[in-house]
Image (cartoon, rainbow, N blue to C red):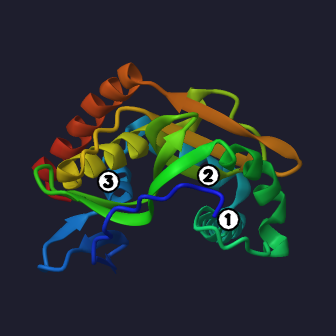
Amino acid sequence: MPFDTELLPRINAKSVRENGKQYYVDAKGSRFPSVTTILNATKPKEERDRLFNWKARVGTEEATRISTTASRRGTQTHKQIERYLLGENPICPEASLPYWESIKPILKEIDTVKLIEGSVFHYDLSYSGKVDCVANYKGIPCICEWKTADKPKNSIERLYEYPLQLVAYMGAVNDYYRDYDIKLNHALLVVAIPEMPAEVFWFDSEAMNNYWEQWQKRVAEYWKKKY
C-alpha cells in the first residue's frame, strides 16, 4: 500500500433524492439535508444570477450537456482516487485520464488516510454529506476535496461556495468522530485540470473559522425558512 491507513468506522447511510433535494438517512432512520442541498437553497442572489446568466449565454441544452459531462468525469476521477488511496493501483478510464494525470502528483503528499468517500452527519446542526477524504497533507490532518475543471480557477474567489462545502464537512467529521481523537481545522481543495498540474488551495485554521461562521448562518437560514 502506498499510504498509511487508519480508517475510521464507516457510517451506514443511504442517499435519497426528493424534489431535486438530496438527503442522507442514517441507520436509525434519521434524515438530514445534504450540504449541497442547503447551499443550493440558500444561495445568495448574485450567485443565482451568475448561474442564470451562464445558462442564458450558452443555452439550456448546452448547459445541461456541460453539467452532465462534468458530473460524469468528476465521478470517474473520484473513483480513481479512491482506488489509488486504498492501494488498488487501478487502470484509469481514458475519459478521466487527463484529470488523473493532473492530480496524481498531489496524492503522493497525502498520508495517514482516515476516511474515503464517507457519509457524515452533524446532529446538532441537522445536516449531512459525503466527504471525499480525511487524511494528512504534508503532515497536517485535514479535509480533502477533489474537483475537476477544464481551466484553472486562479483564485479563491472563483471557487465560489466550495470553501463552505469544505468547512461543512469538516464540522460534521469533527462532530461525528469526536470520540476518535479527531479535531480538524485545515482543509485542502485540489482542482484537476487537463494537461496542467492540479491547482492546490490550502485553508488554514483562521480561514476555516471564518467560513464556519458563514456556514452556520446558511444552515440557520435553511431551517428558518424550512425549504
- 158 to 125, vertically: above or below: above
Q: Residues within 10 Å of mark 3 (few under 14, many from 20)?
A: some
In this view, the residue in front, 77 or 216, is 77
Q: Where is residue 214 drawn, in percent x and y?
A: 29, 31
In this view, the residue in front, 95 or 205, is 205
* Residue 190 lies in quadrant: top right
Q: Amino acid at mark 2?
A: Lys
How far apart are the two marked residues, 2 and 1, measured between alpha carbons? 9 Å
Q: Residue furthest top?
A: 206
Q: Are marks 2 and 1 in contact (CB under 8 Å)?
A: no
Disc assigned to residue 41: 3
Q: Amino acid at mark 3?
A: Ala
Q: Where is residue 186 drawn, in percent x and y?
A: 42, 33
Residue shown at 55% from the left, 30% from the top: 202
Can residue 84 be seen here? The reply is: yes
* Residue 66 lies in quadrant: bottom right
Q: Where is residue 6 drawn, in percent x and y?
A: 42, 58
Q: Which mark is first along the chain, 3 or 2? A: 3
- 115 to 200, vertically: above or below: below
SS category of the residue bearing label 1: helix
Q: Which mark is first along the chain, 1 or 3? A: 3
SS category of the residue bearing label 3: helix
Q: Which residue is labeled 1 in the image? A: 77
SS category of the residue bearing label 2: strand
Q: Are marks 3 and 1 in contact (CB under 8 Å)?
A: no
Q: Which residue is labeled 2 in the image? A: 147
Q: Where is residue 13 drawn, in percent x and y?
A: 28, 76
Q: Residue furthest right?
A: 195
Q: Residues within 10 Å of mark 1 (few under 14, many from 20)?
A: many
